[in-house]
Image (cartoon, grey):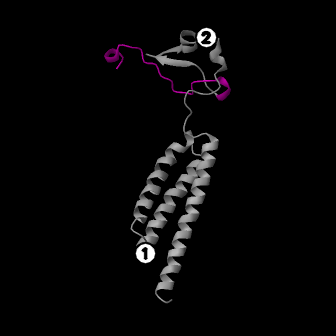
Amino acid sequence: MESYLDCNIRASSNKTGNQRFGGDWILVDNGKKINIKDIYFNNTLIEYPNLLMEIPYFNWASIVDIIVAVSSIIYFIYNKKYPKHSKYYDNICVGVGLHSGVILVFQAWKLYPIFQFGLFLLVTVTIYYAYEAARLRRLLYIYENGG
């Protein structure tokens, strides 16, 4: 790839960035360790406040997203079990919830904590309203059928 692009490619097998977070500025080029701080940057790089890319991890936002995916599956099962309670657009809602939940399980770790909190609030309200809609549909069905 280096010859094709006519450039040097360097990589790191550990965290790259601020030492406070366990990072360093050492990259590997053809087996040689190179301190990129001395080549590309000045002393202000020491003040860089983060890592260049954090290693993904499983956090509470991932758990919230698993809840979204599982809730979508439960909603789908409910609609199949009680088809007269469901509406034509329920499968779209299930698809969107399942799709969003699965994507965010792997991507939510990137969100800032305030965005994760906003996601938690959004999911909580959405699940509540989905439950409430299913409950009201069931009551309407019972009322319409004289039960």
Query: Where is residue 124 shown, x and y percent of the image?
Result: 60, 58
Badge number at residue 40: none
Residue type, numbered disc 2: Asn
Query: Where is residue 85 shown, x and y percent of the image?
Result: 45, 75
The residue positioned 43% from the left and 65% from the top of the image is 90
Q: In which quarter of the image is the N terminus?
A: top left
Q: Is mark 1 on a helix, strand or loop?
A: helix
Query: Where is residue 60 shown, x and y percent of the image?
Result: 61, 49
Where is 141 relative to 54, above or below? below
The residue positioned 54% from the left and 30% from the top of the image is 53
The residue positioned 47% from the left and 56% from the top of the image is 97
Dot 1 or dot 2: first in sequence order is 2
Q: What element carries label 2?
A: loop
The residue positioned 58% from the left and 64% from the top of the image is 128
- Residue 135, image quadrant: bottom right
- Is 110 displayed left or right of 84 in the figure? right
- Is 69 displayed left or right of 119 in the figure? left
Residue behind mark 1 = 81
Q: In whole angstroms, how far apart are the C-alphas of marks 1 and 2?
A: 65 Å
Residue behind mark 2 = 42
Q: What stretch is highlighted in magenta?
A: 1-21
Residue type, numbered disc 1: Lys
On whether residue 8 falls in the magenta region, the answer is yes
Local packing at callout 2 (Cα closer than 10 Å; few below 14, some 14-19, many 20+) is few
